[in-house]
Image (tube, rainbow, N blue to C red):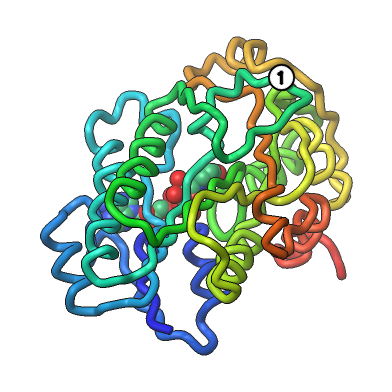
Amino acid sequence: MKILITGANGMLAKSVRERLKEGNELICTDVENLDITKEDVVLKYVNETKPEYIINCAAYTAVDRAEEAGEIVEKINAIGPRNLAKAAKENNSILVHISTDYVFGGELDINEDYKEEDSKSPVTAYGITKLHGEEYIKENTDKYYIFRTAWLYGEGNNFVRTMLKLGEEKDELNVVADQHGSPTYAEDLANIIAQAIEKKIPYGIYHATNQGYITWYDFTKAIFEYAGIICNVNPVTTEQYIKMMKVTQAKRPKNSKLSKEKLLAQGIAVPEWEDALKRYLIKEGKIKQ
Ligand SMILES: NC(=O)c1ccc[n+]([C@@H]2O[C@H](COP(=O)([O-])OP(=O)(O)OC[C@H]3O[C@@H](n4cnc5c(N)ncnc54)[C@H](O)[C@@H]3O)[C@@H](O)[C@H]2O)c1
């Protein structure tokens, strides 16, 4: 299959490329040679290459910086997907797009999880623009998959690598314990995307994270336990963390739990977060097999 990947140098894209390289013709692009914000450039590129699939891994992902970054965030997270949807429609390509738990406000009761169609109330520039991206895709093409993911880690800077470093340097860490969600290994998300394509599941929006719900605090404790790092982890609230660290942050949803029922109903394998973390730490050389 001919597959165009945009934002191909990003964290998720690296896993997608690895997973799909066998048996497919991958056209890997990033902002230098295919800037998704430029409609005419995108249309021309897709008209010329005619991919069966377009996998959009490009995004403006710096959640805190996005609050002050102005219109570039909307351009990359909303206009970009709109351009790709138009180009996909014109060429009968299938668009695969990645969205986020941040399209929800996080105000849902903590004992519940978000279903795909639940009402959206993003509270950050990142979340608002990602929701616009979803809406533009739905308006411009019928053949699309939107996978909403969360708390991604893989090849590149991410929470796990940061915690491994801090845990080795410090005796004690304060970690937020009032945000609930599912850490997601980029390799597992890439595998979910590949399975969806291979199985030709019905088009639409799917929640796609690893299984199981925890907090950043629980996650940090597990990272240290598996990697054999001795460091005290103190649970703090988001408010306490912001005060202690003297940081300004975009608002984080307290409840980022995404229900995977719809994806599981398609027979797609979705590994547990603990299993995913162990595989990641083995790959990073932090634990032995
Ligand atoms: N990282 C997370 O925790 C997380 C959580 C939920 C959802 N997501 C979503 O998952 C997807 C992948 O995220 P990631 O963390 O791998 O991203 P990333 O930040 O690692 O990579 C994004 C890529 O997009 C490229 N890009 C930026 N502007 C572009 C443009 N105008 N045209 C073409 N390419 C451009 C960048 O150069 C980069 O290579 C994104 O859609 C993101 O919103 C990520």
Q: Is residue 84 above or below residue 205?
A: below
**Percent position (x, y) of residue 266?**
67, 62
Q: Is residue 164 above or below residue 51?
A: above
Q: Which residue is mark 1?
A: 109
- In which quadrant of the rendered view does residue 52 lie? bottom left
- The residue at 77%/58% (across/down) is 271
The quadrant the N terminus occupies is bottom left
What amino acid is labelled 1 in the image?
Answer: Asp
Q: Secondary structure at mark 1?
A: loop
Left or right of 209, for residue 82: left
Left or right of 32, for residue 214: right
- In which quadrant of the rendered view does residue 283 lie? bottom right
- Residue nearer the viewer, 140 or 220: 140
Going by the picture, which residue comes out furthest to the left?
A: 40
The quadrant the C terminus occupies is bottom right
**Percent position (x, y) of residue 88?**
29, 65
Going by the picture, which residue comes out furthest to the bottom?
A: 23
User: Does ligand 1 reach within 8 Å of label 1's beta carbon?
Assistant: no
- The residue at 66%/11% (across/down) is 240
- The residue at 79%/46% (across/down) is 223
**Percent position (x, y) of residue 119?**
52, 27
- Residue nearer the viewer, 185 or 128: 128
Q: Residues within 10 Å of mark 1 (few under 14, many from 20)?
A: few
**Percent position (x, y) of residue 135?**
35, 40
- The residue at 87%/40% (across/down) is 230
Figure disc tally: 1
